[in-house]
Image (cartoon, helix red, strand yellow):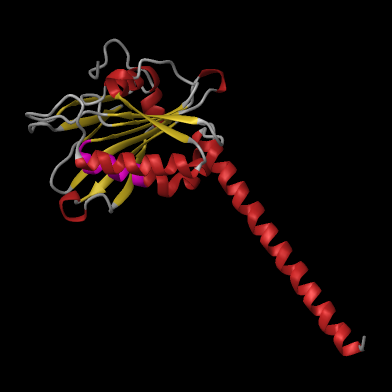
Amino acid sequence: MTDSVLNVVLGLVASAISAGLGWLAQALRRRRRVERVREFFGLPADSECLIVVPRSVGTGSHAHTVTRRDAYALMWLAGLVEECGARPELVAHDAAQRGLGAKTELCLGGPVSNERMAAHLAWGLPGVLITSGPGPGSNVLVVGDRDYTADRDQAHTLLARIATPDDGRPVFLVSGQTGTANQAGVRYLVAHHRELARAHGRNGTFALVLRVVNPEAYGPDMVELAADVTAEALRRPTANSGAA
C-alpha cells in the first residue's frame, strides 16, 4: 500500500471515528435532557400519568363535555407525557378519587369546573382563592393580598407544581380564568419547563401567575410571567383573614 493510499485510509478511519464520537456525544446529551425532563415531571419511561379533565361550564353544557380550548390543552399535555415515554390516562374531574404521589398528575381548569382542582388548591396551595367575578362565568384569582381579574385586555392562569409527601410523583395545576388561559398555561409549561426546573428545582413546589395578553386578538400565544406567588400561595390564611 502506497503512502498516499494509506493516508486516505487513515483519514477515512479518523473521520468515521470523529463522526461516531460526535453522534455518541449528541445521543448522550439528548438522553440527559430527556432524563431531566422526566425527573421534573416525575415521568420515568413506561410510567403512567393522570390527566384530570374539567367539565364545560355553561348553559346546556353536559357534565362530561369539555370546551374546544380545553381539548387543545389536553392534546398538548398528552403529547408532553408521550414525549417522556410515559402513558397518559385521561380521567374526568369527578372520577379521580385516588391519592397523591403514585402517579404524576396534570390537573386542568378552575375549581368550578374541576372538583379535583378545588381539592388540590385547598390542600397544597391554601393561600390561593378563586372567587366569582363581576361578569357571568368570570372569576377572580386571589393570592395573598393580590387580586387578578380578567377583562378584554388580559386573562390570568395559575401554573403550579406541588411536591407530594414521601418523594412521590408531583401534581401540576393549570387553572386559567378562561379556556384560552388554560391553553396558554399548558403551552407555557411545555415551552418553559427547563427554565422552571432551573429556577425552582426539579423536585420543588412553585406557584406562578401568568398573564395572557389580549386573548381576543392573540389567543393563547402572548403569555408572560406576571408574578411568582409561591410564598403567598403556600401561606395558610389566618382565621380572621378577609380571604377566608
- Residue under the point 51% across and 41% down: 84
| 183 in relation to 138, above or below | below
In the figure, is residue 89 to the left or right of 221? right
* Looking at the image, residue 235 lies above or below residue 71: above
Assign the N terminus to one quadrant of the image.
bottom right
Q: Main secondary structure of the magenta part?
A: helix
**Relative image position of residue 77 (x, y in whole percent):** 38, 40
Is there any visible trace of residue 42 in the rendered image?
yes
- The foreground one among 202 and 87 is 87
**Residue 236 magenta-highlighted:** no
Q: Residue at x 62, y 47 (%)?
A: 32
Quadrant of the image for the C terminus?
A: top left
Q: How many numbered circles does the render carry?
A: 0
- For the question of whether residue 201 can be seen, the reply is no
Range of the magenta residues? 177-187
Residue at left 25%, top 47%? Answer: 212
User: Would you identify the image quadrant in which residue 61 lies?
Assistant: top left
Residue 194: x %, y % from top left: 50, 46
